[in-house]
Image (cartoon, coloured by chain):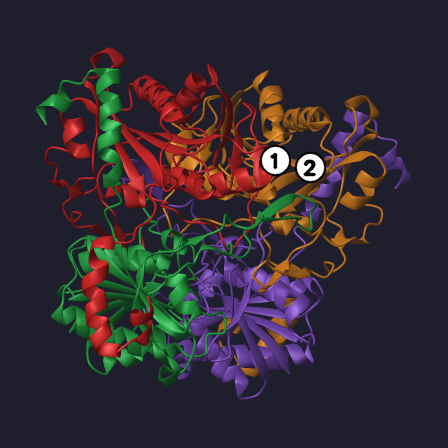
Chain colours: A green, B red, C orange, D purple
């Protein structure tokens, strides 16, 4: 299978090279990844300056941009043939619950989806970063699944894996996104010149981590697989809102529909 | 009402000051916006360097970061009291369909939602940028609506408004996100030193712009209001996937649930 | 006189607008300055990404680049007619001794010199930043001098002015660059994620601040005017070194000369 | 000898690893270099954000900053013991004449000088970049020279080497900086969104390239060694200017001296 592999920790990250090595045993893998750590980059695109691509000694490609840039320029310009799958990771650290919206790892997968391709994001749910191998194997399992059971065209998979040896993994659960508490206070500090600065601190703790959530799976030693929709429309709210607008604006349009 | 206003076109954008002036007639408005144009910033957070806040001559605050940074640092650190609403815009240009995922305008609203507040994103659906006033008035209408009918806690409103005088607006429609075609080829070029560079070009044309979509509303002269969910879980896919995983891993966990 | 005015504190700095207002009483002044604070930018040029110029409400032009970029793009592209003088400042803080090599303020003047124009850099030697007016007046005095006594084609003027009312200024001295002690230890810290970071701290104290230096003038209440050469060749060392090389390489070339 | 090696082409540049390998045959070499290409960075310091240092697989250190940052943080914080020499290069492309003021390669050497250490900058004067080895050998020759004949405390060496095999090198000449013509017009273009952008083009051609200049040496197949002074004071101009100021301000100070 032709696979485009990217990440958000940057082209030198251990998780990237571990996943590359595992995927390359079975597949034809091209790596295009950011030249710097892009954690927190979300789906940002570099619209204001041009991208440059550079081949590294290990044949990985390095881009002066975001994870989304890497996938976009790879598919749209750089690869002679479209890949059949986009994989992003292995992120060093969890992407659970609300993390998803900020994650560059998830964003690279989303970008693959927008380019018309099935896509998987994978993270090792730990700051230690010892067992990337386990996450790499879970990805290989899920690819096998996707070949047999393709995802709907507006979905991607977000996988988180506990940092344990593969044999100690309890299993894999399908989950929904949990929720974090509102982030802890940022850290206010002064730089050495006495000027106020503000740093983000670690993410908030779990607020909704009950059964069925990605947090709950990880906490119990399971990998979590969360199918994410790239259509964010809140369908449940459409009707109630339409009612009010009809009264307010007396839309003829709403009758048409 | 206490309102935190931000945008992604930057603290000097015309759409920002127009919306400020309109909101300030009725509300207590604080503006915190990026010091540079952040179109395409999505929900990116500046995790790797500290933020700085600077007060401008017009009492707007300027931040060396992204739209999400502005809202986060504003609520978490800078404002003495929480605002009651976060508004983001008026973006110069549409945020329709897939644009939403890349939009810094929408991201600033999303960040408000994560901080526990109702939030609205608004864009003027035109590159000419003549009738920001119209969009500002639609926002005021929608605030009136939200006061009476609060959104669920995981939703924001994404509003797009045609670039016409308010009197010529056909009405306001509740819509779902449409879809764009896969983006046009990027532009490959060489810089003056002869090195290859790649630019993003304009967004792709509409692929799903049928009745009910945001594209369809705008095309017919209506403002579109799309409620967006910040929970991206694809609930429809959970069950089918769970079935396969149970077979593959023989998870005891799935029985527990 | 047609003057191009720039700075390194950015297009919104108080020192820039103060100097603009004073110069505009007598001259035809165009302001092109960086969109962000560029202290410490030295003569850096943005070779890897394109520059953009934006007109602000006050008719100043803002550039997404360095002080050198502003002067270069202004003269090379943007201004219809060459200015007759480049002025840079008023920097908020001294540019004395070794500061010169790192200063974006001095660099903007140097760039003017490379473009073939006389050039002046000016700094208010204080962190309080109260009497920019005094520095603005000293600049006007020096322009009067330059008109009568043009500088050689490889020199610029670097002016530092004490932060006192003009009437309290003791006078103006021609000086040489002093020397600072090797900078104080940088500040090692950890970011909120526990990763090592290193900050520059304030500049080192004076090492060579004796009579004749810029430090000495400022310390006694005088403005300092230091003519700087943009040719850095250490002419004194040429001969001794030539001797050794002749022996080592037995250069026939050295005989030719 | 303990050597700190840096460059401005970035930690992955071929010229850096070639020079490392040659120096490491005889010396104890630590490499600290920018994580990205910093051509044109001049002496810029990252005063507004903290630096981070990362060890690469080949034991080189990578810094998210400029060449000057690399040398400064290396000596001031990171190395347990001061090096005895700072070397910067091998730059891919010439640093002749006016280039010196913009060059990150020369700046890294200058920073070493400010930190109290002898310093050498070296560039391969060609865009082909074939014979880095030749430049590496000339550096080794010059180190031998410096050990026997230390430079004055305010000077560094700027070396340019023709891109030929070492055996074809005609010799090494001590030179002064030549001068380039005012740079060619920048390139004005539009980005794919129709907005004006401005690119730097190649440097101007030689204006002063006569006998004795660095240009002249390179053109004839010799390496050029230019001693540069980090004191930019234009001593020749001090007296004449002092005369005028005395009349203008009637300085009592000038009598004191």
Residue C160, percent across and down?
71, 37
Question: Residue placed farthest to the right in the image?
Answer: D256
Q: Is residue A204 above or below residue B221?
A: below
Label 1 with label 2: CB-CB less than 8 Å: yes
Q: Is residue A56 visible?
A: yes
Q: Secondary structure at mark 2?
A: strand
Q: Residue at label 2?
A: C159
Residue C201, percent across and down?
69, 54
In percent of the image, x 23 and y 47: which residue is there?
A: A231
| N-terminal label among 1 and 2 | 1
Left of D148 or right of it: where is B169?
A: left
Instruction: Identify which residue, D184 or B228, lies in the foreground.
Output: B228
Please tell me how crowded label 2 is: few (under 14), some (14-19), or many (20+) other residues with Cα within 10 Å: many
Q: Residue at label 1?
A: C120
What separation in Å lies between label 1 and label 2 (alpha carbons)?
7 Å
Instruction: Identify which residue, A251 or C127, lies in the foreground.
Output: A251
Q: Is residue B144 above or below residue C34?
A: above
Residue B179, percent across and down?
17, 43
Q: Is residue C64 above or below residue D85?
A: above
Left of B215 or right of it: where is D167?
A: right
């Amino acid at each position: 299978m032709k696979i485009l592999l990217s990440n958000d920790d940057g082209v030198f990250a251990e998780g990237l090279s571990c996943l590359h090595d595992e995927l390359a045993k079975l597949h034809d893998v091209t790596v295009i990844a950011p030249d710097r750590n892009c954690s927190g980059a979300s789906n940002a695109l570099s619209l204001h300056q041009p991208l440059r691509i550079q081949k590294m000694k290990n044949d990985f490609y390095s881009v002066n941009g975001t994870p989304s840039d890497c996938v976009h320029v790879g598919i749209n310009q750089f690869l002679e043939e479209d890949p059949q799958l986009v994989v992003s990771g292995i992120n060093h650290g969890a992407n659970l619950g609300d993390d998803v919206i900020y994650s560059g790892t998830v964003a690279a997968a989303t970008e693959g989806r927008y380019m018309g391709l099935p896509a998987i994001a994978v993270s090792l749910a730990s700051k230690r970063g010892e067992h990337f191998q386990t996450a790499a194997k879970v990805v290989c399992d899920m690819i096998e699944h996707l070949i047999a059971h393709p995802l709907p065209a507006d979905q991607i998979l977000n996988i988180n894996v506990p940092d344990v040896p593969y044999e100690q993994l309890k299993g894999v659960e399908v989950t929904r996104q949990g929720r974090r508490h509102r982030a802890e206070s940022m850290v206010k500090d002064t730089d050495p010149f006495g000027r106020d600065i503000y740093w983000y601190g670690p993410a908030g703790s779990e607020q909704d981590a009950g059964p069925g959530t990605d947090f709950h799976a990880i906490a119990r030693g399971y990998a979590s697989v969360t199918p994410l929709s790239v259509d964010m429309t809140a369908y449940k709210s459409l009707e109630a809102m339409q009612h009010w607008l009809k009264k307010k604006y007396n839309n003829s349009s709403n009758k048409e529909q």
